[in-house]
Image (cartoon, rainbow, N blue to C red):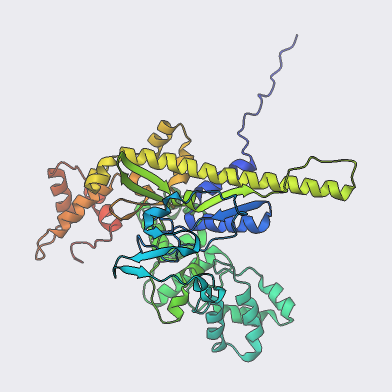
Amino acid sequence: MRLEPTPKPDHALRVSARLVTSSTILHLSADELEHAIAQEQIENPALEVREQRVCLFCGALMQGSQCISCGGFAQPTSESFPSGEQGGSDESLGESLLWGQGSDYRVFDSDNYGWLEHDEDEEFDPLARIPMGQTLAEVLLQQLEALVSPDDAPIAEQLVGNLNEHGYLDISLQEAAEHLQVPLARVEYVLSQLQTLEPLGIGARDLRECLTIQLQALNEQGERHDLAALLIERYLDRLGRNQFQEIARELKVPEQQVRQAAQYIRSTLNPYPAHSYSPDISAGRVTTAYVRPDVIIRKGENGYEVELIEEKRYHFRVGQGYNTQPLQFSVSASSVEMQRYLHHQADRARFFIDCVHRRWRSLKRVAELVVDYQREFLEKGVRYLRPLTRAEVAVRLNLDEGTVSRATANKYALLPNGRLMPLADFFDGSLSVKDVLRELIASEDPRRRFSDDELARIMTARGIPMARRTVTKYREEMGIPSSRER
């Protein structure tokens, strides 16, 4: 008998599309999840979403348009479930100073010590909900009128009309030229004029072009950053994967310079230019952009409690009439196809609902463990932030480390003291050290500033061993200039 080598079976991990979708939903920010739900509602008629009116900044349930607790505003609700089939309870409405039921409630104005009149007609008047400011498309077209000839106005309308919600151009220049039956050079010229307008980066065709437009504008203002331009041009994909060491090796520059350039790109340039536009700015009113919390941390009778705004806001179900009847092969082929379609949409809706519920469960489990571990930090401040890694959380919760990373990425927590904090900061062990360093710099003599070497020696003497380069790194991350610049 001859013994011949046989190939080993392939044990490669096969990742299903469902797993990818579930992981993607977990990674989304609050705004991105809102868009994903709206898009799924458009594409899948089997998915029904009921939105409870909640304040997006403090999580309080609301009846009017403005939150009594914090002054924030509720999200306009989408179509509700049929009467008698609501997905949530309104028991806690009594806690937000609302009296009465139905449309007969009254609101107490704590500032003026009186009852506010509730105009039901205004609440449900569709004209009252029309924004008064101009849209971004209207503003862009008005500005383009002064830059291009009247003959090129249809081109401007075609390009502006094909900007997506992020401000990127969703149509090729060749397609626009063929559709309008104009030379390609004229379309290119109008696009070049569009890309000079605010917000910078508008009209870009991809992320690289968007960032390049913004960087070129900064260069014209005297703020030149050649390494950032090179990273955007040649290493944008690898930059997104944080491959700083490999990039530094290829460019033959210190890794710290690559990290600083990457931080400059992320902190200065905007990958979604349309998101920075506010109708109130065009109307002459300056507004503040708010970051919405995902997790609310409250101090209750039994300790700190974690609450998810999304969980209070959204209630899902599969619509009636979908996947309720078995296939009947005695009927016509068109009827069979229709039932298969209904079953498919119902399965898709159930999967989407399950992914969102998994997101909530994972986020809540991680947040509860972190809050319990960092109890002293919540009570006494940043100096008491304990070292914690995502790997430790993954082991304690029996989760994959990647799941913990996705659950904490782009998420914010509202602390009991009213401060908004990224969940990622709970894993940043340098925060307490930075706080000591910031206090030390603030207390220095204005006539003789501490150098980084002196700061390192003082920190070491206080029981916090630190090298000079570490002091420099932390100081730059906090945006504190050097001793000469101070």
On screen, 81 above or below 143? Answer: above
Position of 4 compared to 39: left or right? right
Res 271 seen here = no
Position of 347 compared to 199: left or right? right
Position of 8 compared to 230: left or right? right
Q: Looking at the rendering, in which quadrant would you find the N terminus?
A: top right
- What is the residue that sits farthest to the bottom in this orientation? 150
- Please state which of residues 180 and 92 is positioned toward the viewer in this rendering: 92
Res 470 seen here = yes
Q: Position of residue 36 (x, y in %)?
A: 57, 55
The residue under the point 74% across, 11% down is 2
The image shows a total of numbered marks equal to 0
Q: Looking at the rendering, in which quadrant would you find the C terminus?
A: bottom left
On screen, 256 above or below 142? Answer: above
Q: Quadrant of residue 60?
A: bottom left
- What is the residue that sits farthest to the top in this orientation? 1
- Please state which of residues 170 and 67 is positioned toward the viewer in this rendering: 67
Q: Position of residue 182 (x, y in %)?
A: 71, 82
- Please state which of residues 7 and 106 is positioned toward the viewer in this rendering: 106
Q: Position of residue 420 (x, y in %)?
A: 34, 55
- Please state which of residues 460 and 429 is positioned toward the viewer in this rendering: 429
Q: Position of residue 28 (x, y in %)?
A: 51, 52
